Every structure is written in structure tokens, then in C-alpha cells.
Amino acid sequence: MTLNLVLATGVAYAAVVVVIIFCIWRVAAPHRKLTPRGQAREAVREPSDKNVVYLTRDSDRAWWTDKFGVSTDVLRAAMRQVGPMSKDIERHLAIQGRDREALPA
């Protein structure tokens, strides 16, 4: 009886240690730096829905800012004005670009 209790306690402690290690690994995983190959793969990835602009993932943010040729702040400002639909944002940024070109230097 005593041996079974010792074994059960040891297994329980081992399970707790495994859970703790797993939790630490999950918390640290997003903070790990990508390898150069991983960064290249992340930068090339296109968004799953090209009709709606989502800026939550770094890869989506990089793709949309490259597509429109603007900074993230300009893209966020356009989204606040016209919404998240890519065609609306594209039209809005084109109008803004024409307005800037028409201004005297």
C-alpha cells in the first residue's frame, strides 16, 4: 500500500512538472525570433481574404502596407474613415494621393 502511494505521488509530481514546462514553453514561444527563412516565408504569405483588410498579424500588416504603398498608421487612418473593405481603402488612398499631387508645393 505504501509503495503504491509513493508511486502515485511521484507520477502526480511528474505530471505537474510537465504541465509547468509546457506552460512556460507556450508563453515563451511567441517571443522567439524567426529564422531568416521563417521571416521570408511570413513576409510572402498573402492574407486569406483579400476583400477585407485585417491588421492583426504581422504578415497581413506587411502585405497590405506593401500593396497600398503606405505606412501602417496611414492604413489604419484610412480604415477608420472608410472601413475595412480593401476596395474602399484603395479608392480612398487613390483620392488622397490625387489631392496631395494637386496641392501647390
Image: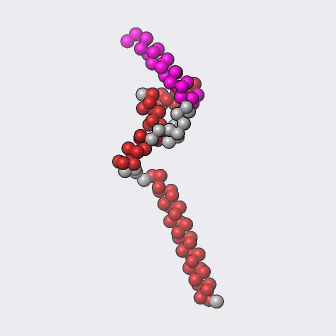
Does residue 71 appear anywhere in the picture?
Answer: no
Q: At which x and y percent is residue 96?
A: 48, 18
Q: Is residue 7 magenta?
A: no
Q: Quadrant of residue 103?
A: top left
Q: Classify the position of the C terminus by image quarter.
A: top left
Compare residues 1 and 36 and report the one nearer the observer.
36
Tell me, what colour scheme is on the image? secondary structure
Q: Residue at x 64, y 89 (%)?
A: 1
Give the residue furthest to the left. Answer: 36
61 relative to 26, above or below? above
Q: Residue at x 50, y 61 (%)?
A: 24
The magenta region covers 83-105
Q: Residue at x 45, y 18 (%)?
A: 97
Q: At which x and y percent is residue 22?
A: 52, 63
Judged by its main secondary structure, the magenta piece is: helix
Q: At which x and y percent is residue 43?
A: 41, 41
Q: Residue at x 40, y 10 (%)?
A: 104
Lateral position of residue 39 relative to residue 88, left or right: left
100 relative to 50, above or below? above
Does residue 73 appear anywhere in the picture?
Answer: yes
